[in-house]
Amino acid sequence: MTTETLYALVGVGLFILGLYALFVRANLLRKILAANVMSSGVFLVLVALARRTGTVAPDPVPHAMVITGIVVAVSVTAFALILMLRIAMKTGQTELPDTWSE
Amino acid sequence: MEVIITTFPWGVVLILVPLFGALSCFMWPNVARYLALSTAFALVMSVIALAVRLITTGSYRHEIGGWGAPLGIELFADGLSLLMLAATAVVGFAVTVYSIGYFPNRQLLRFLPIWFLLLAALNALFLSGDIFNLYVALELTGLAAVALTAMSGGRAALIAAMRYLFATLVGSMSYLLGVVLIYHSFGSLDFMILAERVEASPATWSALGLMSIGLALKTALFPLHFWLPPAHASAPAPVSAALSGLVVKASFYILLRLWLEVFPAGHSLIPGEFLGALGVCAIFWGGLQALRATRLKLLIAYSTVMQVGYFFLVFPLATVVAWHGVLFLLLSHALAKAAMFLAAGNIIYFAGHDRIVDFDRIAQQLPMTLAAFALAGVCIMGLPPGGGFIAKWLMVQASLESGQWWWAAALILGSLVAAAYVFKVVGHSFTQTTVREKTNVVPVLMEWTALALALASVLLGLVASWPLAWMEIGGVFAGVPAR
């Protein structure tokens, strides 16, 4: 197994781990962190697969995609945190209720 | 003059105009409503200009800043994009006009900037020519949509928005992982180049599987629809109209592009039959929940879950007639569903609630609103001459021609369920209740907007040949079997 494949597989593992936590964990902060782990997994796959064999420089396009992705992830996280704070202020809880009231 | 229209990059205008609209509404709150109206009007005009260009010269690409693929971003417009952009501009204009009457001034100033950001993101999505640019536009659309859902700040709205945010995040992450796999296997992000290079391989199957699941989650296909009813029911009425009318279709549009252009049939782990079966479940589950709903906005939200089920019936059929039908359905549903939510907004504005059993002679007190709801209902049910009728007719025809009558049966039975929940609302609007509430006078403009959209959705059936001709621009259906 080459190093790139190993990193890519770790990335996929992080994605699955994050997805699992996002569904299973009740606490909103943990859910937001889980989403971040998911996106880090995707970025790791991107960076790992950008490497080319030999002495050729890595493919720049995946790197550009990762940078764009990080910008998106940061803004999403900031927004999610604000939303979480608002929910905590309104309901006094940091978890989503199981059923939603009409 | 004609040369200008047929050579000008209208796609860029369609993204910049709402972007500047958003900024200027934020910068100059005193004149925000005039800025909003002119932005929405400019959008409609730009779409008309783009339509003229596309009809005379065919589909076109535009390299932003002269930087082409692979590192630059290229905009791409063809008949499919035109159809979605036109729906966005019309619904966008109606919602802008409506929101000025609906929101008190302070809320309006918070609504308008995010609203125009949403329109900019949607337009960028419909004009994207590569799968990564689509990801960015999809994420922007999702963020703006969640922000608008949370706008009222109430408990139910905040919780619904949070759920919506997580659903949309998982959806786009899954899509992005698919994009990564595709890029690694075929070395391009561009639709056209991919269409030539893509071949069946485990990487292609998993990529399309990941992308399809992510997009199905964002389109709220049963059983991934859990986030939609609370979000669409607890958002303010103009927002619900935009969410149900436009945002849900954005992710479905990407799915259509992928299936139509990038991956020919048989390249997916998820067969079309499976998506079609989920669609049938969505039709009956959504219809049943709509019948059971006690609040009007929740009823309309479940009706969207049901209509999304119709969209997915195209995948097992996959003939030219079926694609025509589903695109027509996207267009007519955008108009009709937006009209329904705006009508519901009028009723809430008037009575202060949307509990269906407590409707007090809505038919006498808000005749135009009820007419709007009923006309939009005609389109949703699929009765002639509504746009929904043409769409369902084409889809039934496609399923009979390909010998798969069971999809046609689901389409027709679904229409009966739709008729039942529309009549449930209309029936309660004529009765008198003992509850007397303080009522507000609904601004005339709000009633007219809802009615105009509903009329447009019905009249769409009479001018069906235009959108059907537009769809062909650029030859999207070239590789699709005729029957």
Image (spheres, coloured by chain):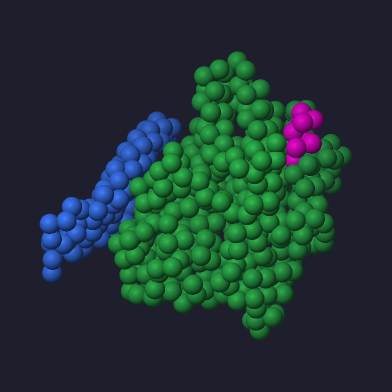
* Residue B447 visible, this orientation: yes
Viewport quadrant of the N terminus of chain B: top right
Please give the letter of the chain rendered in blue.
A
Q: Is residue A34 above or below residue B414?
A: above
Which hue is chain B drawn in?
green
Q: Left or right of A102: which side holds A37? A: left
The residue shown at (68%, 59%) is B328
Q: Left or right of B432: which side holds B27? A: left
* Percent x, y of residue B193: 42, 62
* Percent x, y of residue B482: 64, 76
Q: Which residues are magenta?
A: B442-450
- Would you say residue B259 sits in the magenta stretch? no
The residue shown at (80%, 30%) is B444
Q: Quadrant of residue A13?
A: bottom left
Residue lying furthest front: B3
Viewport quadrant of the C terminus of chain B: bottom right
| Predominant SS of the magenta segment | helix
Residue lying furthest right: B364
Q: Is residue B364 above or below residue B229?
A: above
* Percent x, y of residue A7: 17, 59
